[in-house]
Every structure is written in structure tokens, then in C-alpha cells.
Amino acid sequence: MTRIELQGGAREPLPGARPLRPAAGDERLEVSLILRPNEPARWRERLERLGRGERPAELTREQFARAHGTTEADLRAVGAFAAAHGLAVVQQHAARRTMVLAGTVTQMNGAFGVELWQFEHPQGTYRGLRSAVQLPEDLRDAVLAVLGLDNRPQARPHFRVRTGPMPRRSRAATPPATSFTAVQVASLYQFPAGSGQGQCIALIELGGGYRPQDLQSYFAGLGLPAPEVVAVSVDHAANAPSGNPDSADGEVMLDIEVAGAVAPAAKIAVYFAPNTDAGFLDAVTTAVHDTVNAPSVVSISWGGPESTWTPQALTAMDQALQAAAALGVTVCVASGDSGSTDGVADGANHVDFPASSPHALGCGGTRLKATTSVIQGEVVWNDGNPASGASGGGVSAFFALPSWQQGLDATTVQGQAQPLSARGVPDVAADADPQTGYEVVVDGVQAVFGGTSAVAPLWAGLIARINALTGRQAGFIQPALYAHEAVCRDITKGNNGGYEASAGWDACTGLGSPNGQQIAAIQNL
């Protein structure tokens, strides 16, 4: 049987990792195969129209599956390949273009022509590859990605915890607040009245969990009914709170509490998945194509530097977000909390993914100074300390410049206005500094959280409110925002390490923080 190397699938060991031993032959694992779409030319045409700010007729999820899901022929071909190598097909989903195959390490090595090894790393051991993924010649065009052979952690949550005691907030209208509830932030940003009735907000979580009693306590403290929250298991993951507020529980609770406070009548569907490239992608595609909960907006507060993703994974995730755009689903993604380097210690600037996908609404961070009713000032979030954080942003090293960012500049801290040559991040921003952060309850503990993790669910809640008010899905909103940039509050002071805020779009806070009522108005045009 002739084999060919899967392009973009090779993966180097984590920095500082060393191979220990071959993975045990009888270890069982699952891998996700991403297959090509049907009628890609019609899909590209639809995306081009969306990129020009047009509103083609929305597809239902069922219509999308028929028009652009994978074909029965490709499903059969991959099924025959699996059977030939003793692999079980445990899932297949035409709309998600995904087949999940299960088997032992020995079977996977034989099927994909790889050597799976255990690697030791300071942060723990993981299973990785010592050779490139191989596919049979007859699957060259059908299979675009094979994910899950390597099970290293793919992403990190983008929240930061304010240290020290809970601040005392004055009830007077004049003193500046040092922390806020999400309800107050929404009011400061002039979100339109509404509750998100009839909408579903999807949250992507790669660990941790929530406790219903904490949600009841939190929303009762706001004087709001607790929203309907449902947990959706992806790739065997589940709602699993650890009881440690500094763990991934903090991310899960922050997302639910911010989104739920802004849109309390919306259903919140929490998709729990393993923290691997396969788990992350499977969670996103499961949410986007969920015909039961039918989210109209997705919030993602996890990510990692583009340089830590394989090209096949970058492409597969971007295609999942393209599908969201085609379905009228808005995807809000945190841009990262480590400034312009995104935490990579190589002296260069990096952007966080999936915020750097052109089909994601990248959400950066600000430091908000306000009374309980009036914004007094807003600058780029940058605490000047990597441990405290700064708004992620910069220029993609992988994704091309989208049409709606043509002609923009990224201003460096040296004062150089560099014309954008590739996708610029973020698109928008909102309060993210933990020093002016959001009051939350996590594992029974009251705390103040910040990070761009708070910004993604805040914008998701805004979109849910707007969708409920207008009676239609905002969907791929980026072109409209760039065409009406005055709907955002321009942030012109501060930097994120490598880039400086400037008039108009910048690589720190994008177009700026929201004026919710004006954003709602452009959706009615």
C-alpha cells in the first residue's frame, strides 16, 4: 500500500521535553479525522459574500450538513481504512466532517505509520509522535487532519485572579469603583435593554467545572434568576469541578457568570472536552452543529500561541469557525493575557489562536476606570508584569489579511505605523484588568477575576441580547464592525509590550470597547 505524508501534521516535542519510552502497545486512544467538505466552491463563495458585509440567506444546520458536510463516499472510504487496521468507528458526523476512530497504540502506529512515544516534560508526561503521520494514497484528498495521536495540553485559560482582599465598593455615585459586576460593566458599555430570551450561548471548556449551588448564590446576589445551564460531554469529558478556585473551575465559572449576568434568560450550554487539539476542535464543531441546543453565539476563553499549533490543526479549527460564520453563529474568542509575546520566550511577538482566526471575533482587554454609572477613562490593559498580564494582540504569522482589515496599520511601541500584512488581532476589547475586574463566586469563594477570558463571554452576552432584540442572528459581525467603527469606544492610550494603542484599530484593543446600543443599531440596518 502506497502511503503519503499528511501535510501540516508533523509535531515537534514540547520545549524541554525528552522521549522516555515507546507508548504501551495496549494503551487505547481515540483520534479525530477531519474530512474535506462537499461543494467547497459554494462554501468559499458564501464566505466571500460574508466578508464583504453581505447577508446571504442563513442556512439551517440541516441544510448546511447536506450542502457542505462530508460525503457518504468519503465516510465509507475512511470506514474501510479503519476496518482494515482493526480500528473502531465510535463517531461519525457529516456536518462536523469528523470521524472518531478508537484503537490501541499498536493499531494506531500501524494505521498511520507513526511511532507513538511517552515524553517527559516539566509540566507532566504526554504522548507524542516521533515520525510524521502517513495516510494511504487513496485518502490523500479526503482526510485533511488527524488529531489526537499527540495528547499534550493544547490551550490555557485566559483569566487572571486579583490578589489581596475583596475591594470595598462605595455605594456613592462618585468614587471610582475598583471592581464591577458584569451587570454594571454592561450598563457602563450601554448594552441595549434585554435578557437574551430565546438565545443559547455556547461556552467551550477544556477542564474544570461548575457547582449549581455556586451559581444559585451568585445570581441571587445580583438579584437575577440563575440561567438555565446544561453540560454537554465531548470526547468523554464532563463537568468536573475540582474545588480549587485557581484551577480551570475559575474559567468555567467566570464564563457562566459573566454571560449569564448579561443575558440571564439565555440558555447556557457548556461543552466540556479534553485539553488536546482533538478535544478543542471537537468541542467547537459539536457546539456549532448542535441541533438540540442550537447556539447563536459561542464564547471561547482558551487558546495558545499560533506557534504551538500544527498547520493542520490551525486550518481545521479555522474551517470550523468558517462553518459557524456560514450558519450565522458569532464566535467570540479571548485574545490572550500575556501581551504581544503571548508568553513565548523567544523575543518575538506572537498572537493567540483561535483568536487569530479571521472568522473569530478576537477580544482584547482594557483597564476600566469608572464610577458606578460613568466611564472616566479606559486604557490598554497592561500591568507591566507578566504575572499580572496584558492584552494579547499583534499580527498573525499564519492567516492572510482579511478584506475588512485592508489598509489598517499596527503601531509599534517605537512609534512605527506598520501596514497590516496579515490578520490583525484583536478586533474589539472590554474591561479585562483584574485590578478593575469582575466580581465572581468560584467554588464557594468570592473573588475578583480579570483577563480576556471575561471579555469573550461579555461580548457573547451582548450578541445574545442583540439577537433577541432584532429577531435575527448577528453572525459574522466583523465586517459590519469595521465598516461602522464608531460603534466602539476607541482606546488610544497604553501598550501591550510590542504594540501601542492609536486612533482607530490597533493591535492592543482592536476597534475598542463596545457601545452596545450602537452595535445593536447597525444590526437593524
Image (cartoon, rainbow, N blue to C red):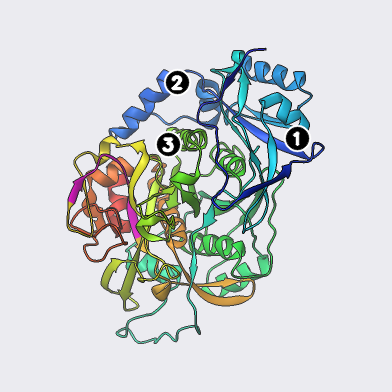
Q: Could you tell me residue 373's position as x and y percent?
A: 32, 75
Q: Amino acid at mark 1?
A: Val
Q: Could you tell me residue 450's position as x and y percent?
A: 45, 68
> Can you identify the residue that label 1 sits on?
105
Instruction: Name the foreground residue: 274 vs 412.
Output: 412
Tell me the number on the disc at residue 297. Answer: none
Q: Amino acid at mark 3?
A: Ala
Whether tag 2 and tag 1 are in contact, CB under 8 A, the answer is no
Between the residue at mark 3 and the residue at mark 2, the CA separation in whole angstroms equals 15 Å
Q: Quadrant of the N terminus?
A: top right
State left or right for residue 482 relative to residue 79. left
Q: Which residues are magenta?
A: 417-429
Say which residue appears at 72% left-offset and 17% top-offset: 80
Q: Is residue 278 magenta?
A: no
Q: Could you tell me residue 374's position as x and y percent?
A: 28, 74
Foreground label between 3 and 2: 2
Q: Secondary structure at mark 2?
A: helix
Query: Would you place residue 399 above or below residue 246 in this image?
Result: above
Q: Amino acid at mark 2?
A: Pro
Q: Main secondary structure of the magenta part?
A: strand
> Can you identify the residue that label 2 sits on?
40
> Could you tell which of marks 1 and 3 lies nearer the N-terminus?
1
Q: Secondary structure at mark 1?
A: helix
Between the residue at mark 1 and the residue at mark 3, the CA separation in whole angstroms equals 37 Å
Q: Secondary structure at mark 3?
A: helix
